[in-house]
Amino acid sequence: MPRAYWLLKTEPNEFSYDDLVRHGWTHWDGVRNYQARANLQRMAVGDWALIYHSVGPKEVVGIAEVSKAAYPDPTVKEDQNPWVVIDVKPLKAFTTPVTLATIKATPSLADIPLVRQSRLSVMPLEADIFALLCELGGTTVPFE
């Protein structure tokens, strides 16, 4: 099965890419949007996700890999909606963060979900868009 590509938003004061590197992995929790939950449920082990800091300097800062597919969110009480989490591990930090301003100023990125659906926290990316964002971040794909 081919790898899929995603973008995951996080607030760096809550959990940053550096936190992910420091911990070595995390379950991606706190998603409380039905479309974002559906995207989490579509993610598979081995998929790659760009990590986007959505507060402060809004920027893509690194790449993570899905290490466990969707499972019930352990922070949810039994009587709540069936929210899910995935597990991710860090792969590579960007040499240069890619700011939202750069994304909006790049014509081939003007229509990506990050721009069109700015409140969505988990979104799919096309492979060529993923590669372009990595290139803008100083990281080539595949990388060592």
Image: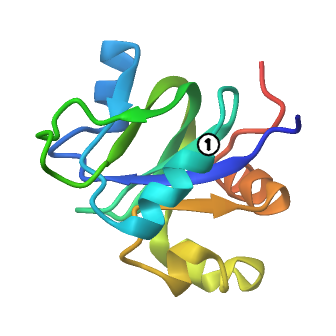
Viewer-side residue, 125 vs 77: 77
Quadrant in the rendering for residue 57: bottom left
Quadrant in the rendering for residue 140: top right
Viewer-side residue, 97 vs 109: 109
> Residue 112: image x %, image y %?
64, 76
Rendered position, 20 above or below 9? above
Q: Residue at x 74, y 50 (%)?
A: 135
Numbered disc 1: secondary structure:
loop
> Residue 2: image x %, image y %?
88, 39
Rendered position, 39 above or below 50? below
Q: Residue at x 66, y 85 (%)?
A: 110
Viewer-side residue, 81 vs 108: 81
The answer to whether 81 appears left or right of 92 in the picture is left
> Residue 6: image x %, image y %?
61, 52
Q: Which residue is mark 1?
A: 43
Q: Residue at x 35, y 24 (%)?
A: 26
Residue furthest to the front in view is 79
How many marks the image carries: the answer is 1
Q: Amino acid at mark 1?
A: Met
Which quadrant, please, contains the C terminus?
top right
Q: Residue at x 78, y 51 (%)?
A: 131
The residue carrying pointer 1 sits among few (fewer than 14), some (14 to 19) or many (20 or more) residues within 10 Å by Cα, namely many
The answer to whether 11 appears left or right of 61 in the picture is left
The answer to whether 143 appears left or right of 35 in the picture is right
> Residue 74: image x %, image y %?
22, 29
Way the structure is coloured: rainbow
Rendered position, 41 above or below 70? below
Which quadrant, please, contains the N terminus?
top right
